[in-house]
Amino acid sequence: DIVMTQSPLSLPVTLGQPASISCRSSQSLVHSDGDTYLNWFQQRPGQSPRRLIYKVSNRDSGVPDRFSGSGSGTDFTLKISRVEAEDVGVYYCMQGTHWPRTFGQGTKLEIK
Amino acid sequence: EVQLVESGGGLVQPGGSLRLSCAASGFTFSSYSMNWVRQAPGKGLEWVSYISSPSTLIFYADSVKGRFTISRDNGKNSLYLQMNSLRAEDTAVYYCAIGRGGDVWGKGTTVTVSS
């Protein structure tokens, strides 16, 4: 199985400051069709997960542009340009290239 | 509006069975693959199972293979998860999610396996 490793696991951030989460996969996530199926999800306290980013860098509808995704191969990053109070929660990366699908451990973002 | 509503969760004894349902609306259900994903209390996300739109492609996590069965009824816009031989470690919130990328998720239904 593909192992997804996120860091850090805990991320205290001051309001208005940037934040960055790393996600590394144990194998390349480039699919035979040429796409890279790496997604990012946000789970606010008490809520179900919501997808923010699909295929590395594509923002979902309604997601603020302060969220951005980048990376390639086995190394990916989610960045928040200026953290707001509503960004508190746990962030997960997930690979959709290989079976079984696998998630990172989650990164808990909190306000410092 | 795209909506997924899970149901069928509850308290069941070890070795028992449950059938989860996911009612879909607001999109063309028959055109999309679907997934079940679970989250144990205080833990992260674990993908459970996938079914393609015409039900020709099905995958399971090793942890549930041989015990769980995913199915769908495109005429009823519904996804199902038949769970047999339940174990304590199956205790979780079970979410259904659309598509390869988990485009949209439901609010989940809670399964508790305990004597």
Image: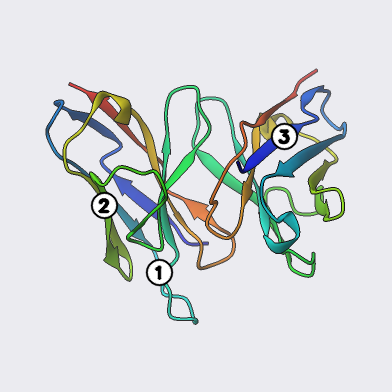
Residue A20 lies, in percent from the top left, at 21, 45
Q: How far apart are marks 1 and 2 (CA)?
A: 22 Å
- Above-or-below relation of B84 to B74: above
Q: Distance between the residues labelled 1 and 3?
A: 33 Å
Please state which of residues A62 and A15 is positioned toward the viewer in this rendering: A62
Q: On the picture, is B38 further left or further right than A18?
A: right
Circle 1 sits on which residue?
A27
**Disc nearest the viewer among 1 and 3:** 3
Circle 2 sits on which residue?
A68
Residue at image location 17% in from the left, 43% down from the top: A81
Residue at image location 76% in from the left, 20% down from the top: B114
Q: On the picture, is B112 further left or further right than B37?
A: right
Identified by mark 2, the residue type is: Ser
Residue at image location 32% in from the left, 60% down from the top: A57
Q: Quadrant of residue A106?
A: top left
Subunit under mark 2: A
Q: Which mark is residue B6?
A: 3
Q: How far apart are marks 3 and 2 (CA)?
A: 30 Å
Identified by mark 3, the residue type is: Glu
Q: On the picture, is A84 further left or further right than B86?
A: left
Subunit under mark 3: B
